Image (tube, grey):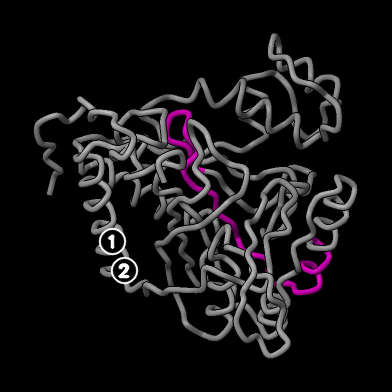
């Protein structure tokens, strides 16, 4: 079925402060997309689950800030501080370790300090896991879901897979694995950034957002694979072309990043070491130190099956479907109106 917009499809609404930030049809399109997502996974026998929004642990990733809150009731000695999830990843992996099998969750996640044109402090994330798959196989399914969503509005997009190394070399003429920090800074051209405190990965990210993404074709799904090992997050590391790379992908539709997927790390000791490195970076920045998720480490120790997982930003997908650069246009009430 194809989504049929009603009158006033792009007219917006009167701004009286209390009114929604999205049009009626944008809100209706979200409902259609939610239904499509659930039907997509139902026919593939992927189980929908729900996991806690509040957790004993926060996200240690240095570039993601978690909201925390204080519970006033009985805790039986447990910490009163709880953390709003930035992703359902850790809880879903605990279910996988317990034997739940292929599963997904569609729900709200929260990130502090992120508000603006492309960001809202609370947003909708779709995350799913496929047992026995690697990240390369998962690219095809992720693209299939996005293309099904685009079909709702009569659009389509072709899929192209490119390595991180080739993307930087072919577009900017540099090798992101061997270029000096000075070469990375120079590749930004007339983009001026305060270099104080920036790491090599920060410069690479700036090149992606300022020099590469703006040139991505509007009707192309681009899956970028084989990221530098320093950007492994929760992914496995492998050797490619003589360098270690993270077995992960990011999927873009035009300039918008839609999804981030991993061939998931199963090693509890390695995951604990990565958490420790995150805390070291946070200490150097005088940032908050969210508690490490001991439940996740115990689940990995028990045995996480070989799997691949991906998180897709539903709001970003809706933005791409509607051709808007404002996340407010796809939210019933954005942050200033919430």
Kindly identify which numbered label has been placed on residue 40: 1
For the residue pair 188 and 13, the one nearer the viewer reads as 13
Residue 57 percent location from the top left of the image: 68, 69
**Left or right, 89 with reference to 125:** right
Depicted 304 relative to depicted 144: above or below: below
Q: State the CA–CA distance, disc 2 to disc 1.
A: 7 Å
Q: Which residue in the rendered view is the most extreme toward the bottom?
A: 76
Which portion, as a residue range, is magenta? 251-274
Residue 318, image quadrant? top left
- Badge 1: residue crowd in 10 Å (few <14, some 14–19, many ≥20): some
- Badge 2: residue crowd in 10 Å (few <14, some 14–19, many ≥20): few
Residue 214 percent location from the top left of the image: 52, 22
Residue that label 2 marks: 44
**Left or right, 211 with reference to 314:** right
Query: Residue placed at 68% from the left, 86% from the top?
Result: 302
Depicted 88 relative to depicted 156: above or below: below
Residue 254 percent location from the top left of the image: 43, 29
Q: Which residue in the rendered view is the most extreme toward the top?
A: 190
């Amino acid at each position: 079925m194809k989504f049929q917009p009603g009158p006033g499809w792009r007219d917006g609404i009167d701004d009286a402060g209390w009114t929604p930030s999205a049009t009626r049809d944008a809100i209706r399109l979200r409902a259609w997309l939610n239904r499509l997502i659930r039907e997509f996974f139902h026919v593939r026998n992927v189980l929908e689950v729900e996991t806690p929004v509040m957790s004993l642990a926060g996200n240690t990733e240095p570039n993601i800030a978690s909201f925390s809150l204080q519970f006033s009731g009985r805790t039986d000695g447990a910490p009163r501080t709880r953390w709003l999830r930035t992703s359902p990843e850790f809880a879903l992996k605990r279910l996988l370790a317990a034997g739940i099998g292929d599963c997904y969750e569609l729900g709200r996640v929260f990130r502090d300090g992120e508000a603006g044109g492309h960001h809202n402090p609370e947003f909708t994330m779709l995350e799913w896991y496929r047992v026995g798959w690697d990240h390369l196989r998962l690219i095809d399914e992720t693209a299939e879901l996005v293309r099904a969503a685009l079909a709702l509005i009569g659009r389509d997009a072709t899929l192209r897979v490119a390595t991180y190394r080739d993307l930087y070399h072919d577009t900017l003429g540099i090798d992101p694995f061997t270029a000096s920090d000075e070469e990375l800074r120079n590749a930004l051209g007339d983009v001026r950034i305060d270099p104080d405190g920036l790491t090599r990965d920060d410069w690479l990210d700036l090149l992606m957002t300022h020099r590469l993404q703006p040139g991505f074709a509007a009707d192309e799904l681009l899956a970028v694979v084989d990221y530098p090992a320093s950007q492994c997050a929760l992914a496995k590391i492998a050797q490619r072309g003589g360098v270690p790379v993270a077995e992960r992908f990011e999927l873009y539709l035009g300039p918008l990043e839609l999804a981030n997927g991993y061939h998931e790390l199963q090693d509890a000791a390695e995951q604990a070491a990565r958490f420790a490195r995150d805390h070291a970076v946070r200490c150097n920045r005088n940032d908050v130190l969210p508690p490490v998720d001991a439940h996740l480490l115990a689940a990995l120790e028990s045995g996480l099956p070989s799997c691949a997982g991906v998180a897709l930003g539903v709001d970003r997908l809706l933005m791409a479907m509607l051709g808007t650069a404002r996340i407010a246009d796809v939210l019933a009430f954005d942050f200033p109106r919430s």
